[in-house]
Amino acid sequence: MFRNIIVLVGTLVVMGVISAVLTYARAGSMSPVADIQSKGLAAVQKGNLIFFGVVVPLVVGVIAFFVYRSMLARSPATANTSFLLLSVGIGIVFTILAAVVFKMRGFAELTALHVVYIAGLGWFMPMLWTV
């Protein structure tokens, strides 16, 4: 169990760093123009670092931990495949929602973030848990 938490924390740190760097560098194209004009680009970038680099990985990681652990307890033989398919499905739904809600603003960046999370939590983390 302790090893699994170490794997989760390591995965979350890597995903948090990738997310923070991506959203910091692309804050100008991801954030609404009104936010950039009112707060300034530096403040928007700092907010993106905290939100996408710390908050999102922690929330998604904790949820993924409990969901995967539950799937592993119920059907260990198919847990990895089922969890990966669930991750891909959720990623597709969130990508479509991002396109609709944000009117395609930052679509490429959000799609890249979804791919990072699918790869990190849906594929890489379960693969390391079963080794």
Image (cartoon, grey):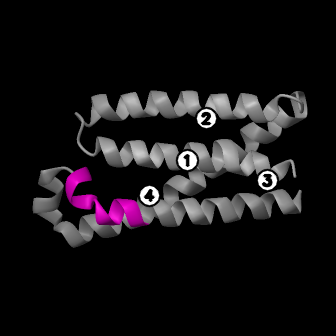
Mark found first going from the N terminus, 1 or 3? 1
Residue 39: x %, y % from top left: 17, 65
Q: Is residue 63 visible?
A: no
- Whether 78 is drawn above or below 110: the answer is above
Question: Residue tagged by mark 2?
Answer: 87
Alpha carbon separation for disc pair 4 and 2: 18 Å
Q: Secondary structure at mark 2?
A: helix
Q: Nearer the viewer, mark 4 or mark 2?
A: 2
Q: Is residue 25 magenta?
A: yes
- Whether 90 is drawn above or below 51: the answer is above
Q: Residue at x 28, y 59 (%)?
A: 26
Q: Mark 2 belongs to which amino acid?
A: Ser
**Which label sits on residue 52?**
4
Depth check: give the residue in front, 62 or 119: 119
Question: Residue tagged by mark 1?
Answer: 117
Query: Quick check: 88 left or right of 4?
Result: left
Look at the image and give the residue range highlighted in magenta.
Answer: 21-30
Question: Residue tagged by mark 3?
Answer: 128
Q: Secondary structure at mark 3?
A: helix
Alpha carbon separation for disc pair 1 and 3: 15 Å
